[in-house]
Image (spheres, coloured by chain):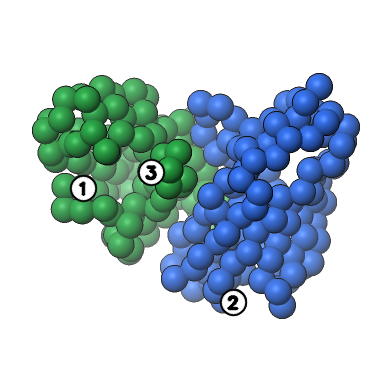
Chain colours: A blue, B green
Amino acid sequence: GENVEQHPSTLSVQEGDSAVIKCTYSDSASNYFPWYKQELGKRPQLIIDIRSNVGEKKDQRIAVTLNKTAKHFSLHITETQPEDSAVYFCAARTSGSARQLTFGSGTQLTVLP
Amino acid sequence: DAGVIQSPRHEVTEMGQEVTLRCKPISGHNSLFWYRQTMMRGLELLIYFNNNVPIDDSGMPEDRFSAKMPNASFSTLKIQPSEPRDSAVYFCASSHPRTPDTEAFFGQGTRLTVV
């Protein structure tokens, strides 16, 4: 089955700096890669996703890049703000009838004011 | 739509007792997922239903865990008997069949504490 590894497990940045979180996946058949943000005590919520037919997607301060050859994808947050502090999860889904997401272990991002 | 609804939000029970967690997916979503979240193991998929049929239950930790989906608008996850190591936040999520790869919407979760 799919295996998703996520790094780093914790990340602290100064407000206004950029943050980068990286994930690798094992199944070359995976074709959908969402990123979820989970604030303390709340549910995971989708912030951005990318499909295997594109290499980059951007939404305001958030961008995701995908390298299918190397089987890795990254989340980039620019101009970080304190409200960006949360746990971020990457995930991968394989095409076909199996539609469940395999999640990475999460990254605790802390933005220091 | 109110989103994925889970109940109860919090559950405290004694070891050995039966626990039932409930989930109402978003109307029209045909895929439903149960996840367990702990500090040690992160988000783990327990079981996945498609059109009310269990597709993959390989993540169910042991026979004490069982899940049902009697209709498109309701699912339960049961633990019998419960043990302290079952303490975790249990999330239910659902997704829409319209496109091959769509977002999974999570419920608010049930925080289970087994003492």
Pointers 3 and 1 in contact (CB under 8 A)? no
Q: Which amino acid lies under the numbered mark 3 shown in the image of this protein?
A: Arg
Residue position for label 2? A28
In the depicted structure, whether residue B6 falls above or below residue A34: above
Callout 3 crowding tier (Cα within 10 Å): few <14, some 14–19, many ≥20: many
Q: Which amino acid lies under the numbered mark 1 shown in the image of this protein?
A: Phe
Callout 2 crowding tier (Cα within 10 Å): few <14, some 14–19, many ≥20: few
Parent chain of label 2: A
Question: Along the line of sight, which residue is nearer the eye, B102 or A40?
Answer: A40
Real-space Cα separation, disc 3 to disc 1, in angstroms: 12 Å
Which label was assigned to residue B36? Answer: 3
In the depicted structure, whether residue A82 falls above or below residue A8: above
Parent chain of label 3: B
**What residue lies at 31% left-to-right and 29% top-to-bottom?**
B112
Residue A29 lies in quadrant: bottom right
Quadrant for the C terminus of chain B, please: top left
Residue B30 lies in quadrant: bottom left
**What residue lies at 43% left-to-right and 47% top-to-bottom?**
B41
Real-space Cα separation, disc 2 to disc 3, in angstroms: 26 Å
Which one is earlier in the sequence, the residue at label 3 or at label 1? 3
Parent chain of label 1: B
Name the secondary structure under disc 2.
loop
Callout 1 crowding tier (Cα within 10 Å): few <14, some 14–19, many ≥20: some
**What residue lies at 45% left-to-right and 38% top-to-bottom?**
B39
Pointers 2 and 3 in contact (CB under 8 A)? no
Real-space Cα separation, disc 2 to disc 1, in angstroms: 32 Å
Where is residue B31? Give x, y as percent: 42, 54
Name the secondary structure under disc 3.
strand
**Residue B12 seen in the current view:** yes
Residue position for label 1? B65
Where is residue A33? Give x, y as percent: 63, 59
